[in-house]
Each structure stands twice: as C-alpha cells, then as structure tokens.
C-alpha cells in the first residue's frame, strides 16, 4: 500500500478505509473542539464590549449570529448521519468563517494586537485542534490569510511595514501549521497503514495457523493410516518370513544381524550351539574354521553383488546340503547390508548324487556289458570249437575205438566247460534276483578241503605245480553247520583261479579257526593282481587286467559269485596279492556248531546205474512237447528206454489238444519256450482239467525264477537243458517208481 507524499492520499480502497477510521477516531475531539472554540469565541465577546464599545454590536453580530451559530450547527450536525460524509467540508467552512470573523475584527481595529493573537489561535485550532485534514486545513489557512490581506489592504490601508510584519507572523504560523498538520496526518496515516498491514499479517497468520492445524490434522491422519498399513504389511511379511521352512536373515555392514527368522535361529543353534538374534555378529558366531569361508561371501554381497551358493555342512547328524541366495540391501544408492535366503536342498542333492552314481553305474554296466559280450563270445566259441571240431572228426569211419573215446571225451569236456559258464550266469542272475537261499547243513570242513584237494590234484600236477594243504582244523572242530554246496563252489573257484593264473610254484590250501569264524585261504605263486584292481575283481564280469582279458578263459564271474556266497553266509572275502609274486585269497565263514538237520545224501548213490533206474517202470504214455527236433529226439531216445508210448507236440496249443484227445497220458515233458502258446500256459490249461498227470518242465533258459514259475504254473518238476539222461530218469523214477 502506497500513498501520495504530497496529498498523503492512499489508493482508493484503502483511502476509504482510512477516512472511515479517521472519522470515528476524530468524532469526539471534533465535538469537544467545537464546544470549546464556540465557548472561547463567545467569551471574547465580553472583552470586545470592554475595549471597543463602538464596535461591540458589529462584533457581537459576527460572534453570536455568524461564527458561534455556524460552529454550533456543525456540532449538532455531528450527531446526524450526513455528517460522516461532509464533516471535513463543514470543518473547512467553519474554519474559514472563524478566520474571516477575526480578519474583520483586525480590519476594523488594527491597533488591537489581541486580535492578531486571536488569528494565531484560529490558525492553531485549524491546523491542530479541530481535526481538519492537512490539505483542507492548508487551503483554509491560506484562504483566511488572503481574505485578511484583501480586507486589511482595501479597508485599513496599513503601513507597509506593519502589513509585512503581520503577514510575516501569519505566514509563519501557516507554514508551521502546515508542517505540523502534515506530520500529524502523516503519522496518523502511517499508524493506520501499519495497523492495517499488521491486521493483514494477523489475518494471514491466523489463516496460516488455521491451515497449519488442518494440515497437522491431515498429516496425523495420513500417518495413522500409513502406520496401520505398515503394521499390516509387517504382519504379513513376518507371517511369510516366519512361516517358511527356509532360513532367512539380514545383516548390516558390520555383519550384525538385522533380522533372523525362527527357523534359522533354531537350525543354527542345533548345528553350531549358538543362539543368534538381532545385533549379534554373524561372523563371530560361526566356528573358527567356517569364518574364512563365510566372511568373503558376506563381503561380496556388501560389494553389491547378488549371488547364490551351494554348500555342504556337517550338522553332526550327517551332511546337510544348503543353497543360499545373497542379495544386497540398497538404500539411497548405497549398500547398507545384505539379505540371505537359505534352503535345505539335501533331498535334491542326494537325488542328484544318486542319479550321478546311477549314471556312472549305468555307464560302467554298459562298459562291462561290452566286455562281457566279447568275453562270452570267446568263452563260448572255444568249447564250441572243440565240440564241432571233434564231432566232425568222429565221422571218420577209420577211427579206432580209443580215438573215438578220446574225441568223445574232448566233446564232453568242452560241453561241460560251456555249461559251467552258463551255470555261472544262472547263479549270478539268481543271486541278483534274491532267489539264492542259504541251505545250512552239518558238514565236515576237513573232508571238504580234502575233496577239493583230491579233485584238483591231477590238474595241478599236470601243470607241473605243487599242491599242498597247509592247515587242517583239529578233528573235533571240523564239523560245522554251513551251506556245503556254496563252500564247495567258493573253494572250487579259488583253486581253479590259482591253477589258471599260476605257471610255476605252489598252490596252498588251508583253513584256520579264528574266534567265531573259520578262515580259509588259497595261496598261489602266480601272476598276482595289481593293487588298484584288487577290489574290482570281486565285481561281476571284471578281470584284473582288462587288456589281457582274452588271454585266459573265464567270464569274470567266479569271484563275484564267491563273494555273494560268502556274504550270504555271513563272512568276508578279500585278497592279498603282489603283482608277479602271487596271491592269497581269504574268506571267512561263521563258525556255527550244532546239529539241526540230518545230512541228506548229496546225490544218488554212485552205484545206481541206468538199469536200476528204468527197472520197474514201463508202459508209460509220455507226451513230449518240444519245438526243437534235436532236443525232441534226445528225449525220445531217453524215454524209450522205459518202453514208453511216445506222443509228440510241436507247440503249446498242440500239446493241450493232444492231451484233450488222450487224457490217459501219464507224463508230459513240457518245453517252456515254444511258439504260440508257451509251456507255462499249456501246463496251466492242462492242470485246469487234470490234476493227476505229471508235468516236468524242461527249459534252456536256466534263468532265475524259472523253477518257481514252472511250479506255479502247475508243473510237478523242473529240469534244465542240456538234459542229462541220468537225472531225467531218476526224476521220472521219483514220480512213478514203486
Ligand atoms: P575269471 O573267470 O576271469 O577268472 P573271476 O571272477 O574268477 O573271473 O576272477 C576275476 C579276475 O580276477 C580274473 O580275471 C583275474 O584277472 C583275477 N584273478 C582271480 N584269481 C586270481 C589269481 N589267483 N591270480 C591272479 N589273478 C586272479
């Protein structure tokens, strides 16, 4: 807000406000001043009368009929509503009239100096007392002065000096009045202006205050809402963090824990015996040995690098595999800490390891399979070569009886060798299928050793080697409870190998009692086994020197069968060997004593001859179900010894049909693998209609579980090919003999 420096007038709106304010502040003083001035003006009338009786009438007219009535009129008008609008003009007119009155008096009685003083009073009242504003007071002052001079000059003709003198005082009074009045109004306006500004400021402050309160209230509400929202989020997040089975923790730049969930607290305590909580130093809580592993990880994440690791931890309860994701916590572009999310991946890891192992195993099996096939091919071709070669030679009609017997002997040996291999395969398959059972019987160990010794002695000596039994058991300790067949098989394998892998020197055999076990050993002075192969040779199809595998016969099964038998019996098998010097194979068997089962004869009495077997059985009606003509012929020749009636079927279906037509058949020799319907199915169908007929299954599979399957299909017995006439006949005798 600005105002004119000369007129002191504010801009329109403010000027109006000022004038209103000025009016209300001045009203009382206006009234008082008018009463006082009217009173004084009247009082001085008495002095007129005393000093200038000749002018008293005129002066009294001026005083009591003009000036005082005008002043009183203005006084009374001050109580009306119009006064507010015209009061300055009324004061202006009043002043001029008052001034003019005194001027007339001076004009008429210039020698009376008291009127000059009166004039001064008029000026001072006009400028200071009656609240006339500066501009109007000035104009009125100067008008009065002009009127005075006109009157005095034209009427009184004063001396110039006197005129100048009086004017000098009046002008001075006017100028002083003007300055003073200007100043008064200036300060009045300034006060008003400042008050006005102050009020505005006050209003603004009040407004701001009110606003501030509102804002504070709004902010408070917002904060309350934000707090509630934060609490909800916090509750949710906590539920997630605490509800998971994963380990979650966070730390600051000093490795101090900021957050840790209960799962991790419990797990850490279980593993390391330390209870972690916020504020605890993560590195120092770890065992000394783990600190150099974990600190660099925390440092990496504090370097703003997110990453994931997998680790194996020994928890005291076995190895636990964990996966931990590290993530930096960034605030305003700076890493202030890190968070970790750890999960137990033991299950997955173990599966992976198992898978890897299985894969390696599969690869190894594959490799072994190839080695096995190559080996088998060699192992089967060699005896086949003998059989076919010498069969061919047998055709020669010029052969002597001895030559014929020699060739037949070779053919038989080759056949036996081939059967050996096949039996090994069957055994291993039965072992793997879990079908191989322990058959504990009382047996004399010393006798078994002796038997092996006498059985192999000719072969050993033929090779130019020495064969000795070093240790026997004391006689009374020699009877134990064991699986005789398996012990034979183990010893046979070991001695056979010793012969096979020894060129010169000695083979020793023996058995010692050690605590609750018997320890057998077979020692040779042969080629020995490299250290790194000494464990592998007990695996299937593995030979010590793969490169040399063709060198000696063998399918790499003997030791693995032996190992399975030993372990099945509750013992151990191992080798001590030096390459080029020789080997000692050891195995132990639990020393079981006591007699539970009476020993049964191992085989049919030696003296039993084919003649004994066929005696007493004749006239059987026998059906041979067999698709292979050679096998069929062999069976036919054997059973014809019994003087039987022989019927033949080439398939399962045919067998069932023939039996259907001739239900008086006594015996069926049922081949298992036949085209169309196999032997199991044919046996099953025949069994449905007839329970008496004896069915003997005969198979070339020789595989694990064949016997069980045959019996389950309804067969009475089971014989493997190659069919040995002796065995077949004794089997028939068992079923039909008297
Ligand atoms: P194989 O039929 O090949 O003899 P085994 O399972 O009986 O099968 O033996 C496995 C391998 O162990 C043999 O191929 C051979 O390399 C090694 N071995 C077994 N016995 C002896 C031994 N007495 N001296 C040297 N090596 C042997």
Image: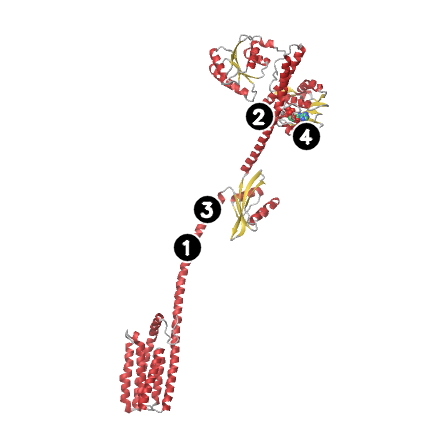
Horizontal side, residue 287 vs residue 469: left or right: left
In terms of secondary structure, where does tag 4 sit? Answer: loop
Disc 3 marks which residue? 236
Q: Is residue 569 visible?
A: no
In terms of secondary structure, where does tag 1 sit? Answer: helix
Do the numbered discs 1 and 2 sit on residues whose CB atoms are within 8 Å? Answer: no
Residue 47 position by quadrant: bottom left
In terms of secondary structure, where does tag 2 sit? Answer: helix
- When the figure is inspected, residue 633 is found, relative to residue 113, above or below; the finding is above
Q: CA distance from mark 1 to mark 2?
A: 78 Å
Q: CA distance from mark 3 to mark 4?
A: 66 Å
Q: Nearer the viewer, mark 3 or mark 2?
A: 2
Q: CA distance from mark 2 to mark 4?
A: 28 Å
Disc 2 marks which residue? 432
- Name the quadrant of the C terminus: top right
Q: CA distance from mark 1 to mark 4?
A: 86 Å
Do the numbered discs 2 and 4 sit on residues whose CB atoms are within 8 Å? Answer: no
Q: Nearer the viewer, mark 1 or mark 4?
A: 4
Do the numbered discs 3 and 4 sit on residues whose CB atoms are within 8 Å? Answer: no
Disc 4 marks which residue? 530
Q: CA distance from mark 3 to mark 2?
A: 56 Å
Q: Nearer the viewer, mark 3 or mark 4?
A: 4
- When the figure is inspected, residue 299 is found, relative to residue 448, above or below; the finding is below
Give percent across and percent down for residue 273.
57, 43
Q: Nearer the viewer, residue 327 or 564?
A: 327
Between discs 3 and 4, the one toward the N terminus: 3
Q: Nearer the viewer, mark 1 or mark 2?
A: 2
Residue at image coords 40%, 73%: 190
Horizontal side, residue 98 vs residue 289: left or right: left
- Name the quadrant of the N terminus: bottom left
């Amino acid at each position: 807000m600005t105002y004119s420096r000369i007129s002191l007038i504010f801009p329109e709106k403010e000027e109006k406000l000022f004038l209103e304010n000025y009016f209300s502040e001045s009203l009382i003083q206006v009234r008082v001043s008018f009463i006082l001035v009217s009173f004084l003006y009247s009082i001085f009338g008495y002095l007129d009368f005393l000093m200038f009786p000749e002018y008293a009438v005129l002066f009294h007219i001026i005083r009591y009929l003009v000036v005082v009535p005008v002043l009183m009129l203005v006084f009374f008008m001050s109580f009306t509503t119009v006064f507010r609008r015209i009061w300055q003009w009324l004061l202006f007119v009043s002043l001029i009239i008052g001034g003019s009155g005194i001027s007339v008096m001076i004009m008429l009685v210039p020698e009376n100096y008291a009127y000059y003083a009166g004039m001064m009073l008029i000026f001072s009242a006009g400028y200071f007392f009656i609240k006339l504003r500066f501009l109007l007071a000035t104009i009125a002052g100067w008008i009065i002065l002009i009127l005075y001079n006109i009157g005095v000059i034209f009427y009184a003709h004063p001396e110039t000096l006197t005129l100048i003198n009086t004017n000098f005082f009046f002008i001075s009074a006017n100028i002083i009045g003007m300055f003073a009045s200007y100043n008064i109004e200036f300060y009045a306006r300034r006060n008003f202006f400042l008050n006005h500004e102050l009020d505005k400021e006050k209003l603004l402050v009040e407004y701001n205050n009110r606003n501030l309160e509102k804002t504070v209230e709004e902010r408070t509400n917002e904060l309350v809402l934000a707090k509630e929202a934060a609490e909800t989020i916090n509750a949710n997040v906590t539920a997630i963090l605490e509800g998971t089975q994963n380990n979650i923790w966070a730390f600051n730049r000093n490795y101090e824990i900021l957050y840790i969930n209960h799962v991790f607290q419990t797990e850490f305590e279980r593993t390391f015996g330390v209870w972690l909580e916020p504020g605890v130093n993560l590195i120092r809580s770890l065992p000394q040995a783990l600190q150099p592993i974990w600190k660099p990880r925390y440092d990496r994440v504090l370097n703003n690098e997110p990453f994931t690791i997998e680790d194996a931890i020994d928890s005291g309860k076995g190895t636990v595999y964990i996966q931990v994701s590290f993530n930096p916590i960034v605030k305003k572009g700076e890493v202030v800490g890190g968070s970790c999310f750890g999960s137990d991946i033991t299950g997955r890891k173990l599966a992976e390891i198992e898978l890897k192992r299985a894969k390696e195993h599969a690869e190894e099996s594959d490799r072994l399979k190839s080695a096995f096939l190559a080996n088998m091919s060699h192992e089967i071709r060699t005896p086949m070569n003998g059989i076919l070669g010498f069969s061919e030679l047998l055709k020669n009609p010029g052969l002597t009886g001895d030559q014929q017997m020699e060739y037949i002997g070779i053919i038989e040996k080759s056949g036996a060798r081939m059967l050996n291999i096949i039996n090994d395969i069957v055994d291993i398959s039965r072992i793997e299928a879990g079908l191989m059972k322990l058959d504990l019987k009382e047996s004399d160990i010393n006798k078994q050793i002796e038997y092996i010794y006498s059985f192999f002695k000719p072969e050993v000596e033929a090779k130019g080697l020495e064969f000795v039994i070093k240790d026997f058991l004391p006689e009374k300790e020699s009877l134990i409870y064991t699986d005789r067949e398996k012990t034979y098989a183990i010893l046979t394998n070991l001695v056979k190998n010793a012969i096979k892998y020894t060129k010169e020197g000695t083979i020793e055999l023996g058995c010692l009692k050690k605590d609750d076990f018997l320890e057998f050993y077979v020692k040779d002075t042969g080629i020995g086994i490299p250290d790194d192969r000494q464990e592998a040779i007990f695996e299937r199809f593995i030979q010590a020197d793969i490169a040399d595998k063709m060198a000696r016969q063998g399918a790499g099964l003997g030791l693995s069968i032996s190992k399975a038998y030993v372990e099945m019996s509750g013992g151990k098998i191992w080798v001590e060997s030096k390459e080029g010097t020789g080997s000692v194979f050891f195995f132990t068997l639990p020393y079981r004593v006591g007699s539970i089962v009476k020993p049964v004869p191992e085989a049919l009495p030696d003296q039993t001859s084919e003649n004994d077997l066929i005696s007493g059985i004749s006239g059987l009606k026998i059906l041979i179900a067999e698709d292979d003509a050679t096998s069929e012929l062999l069976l036919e020749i054997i059973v014809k010894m019994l003087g039987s009636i022989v019927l033949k079927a080439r398939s399962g279906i045919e067998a069932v049909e023939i039996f259907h037509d001739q239900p008086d058949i006594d015996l069926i020799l049922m081949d298992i693998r036949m085209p169309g319907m196999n032997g199991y199915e044919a046996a099953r169908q025949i069994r449905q209609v007839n329970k008496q007929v004896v069915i003997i299954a005969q198979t070339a599979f020789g595989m694990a579980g064949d016997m069980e399957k045959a019996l389950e299909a309804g067969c009475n017995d089971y014989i493997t090919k190659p069919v040995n006439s002796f065995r077949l006949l004794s089997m028939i005798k068992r079923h039909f003999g008297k």
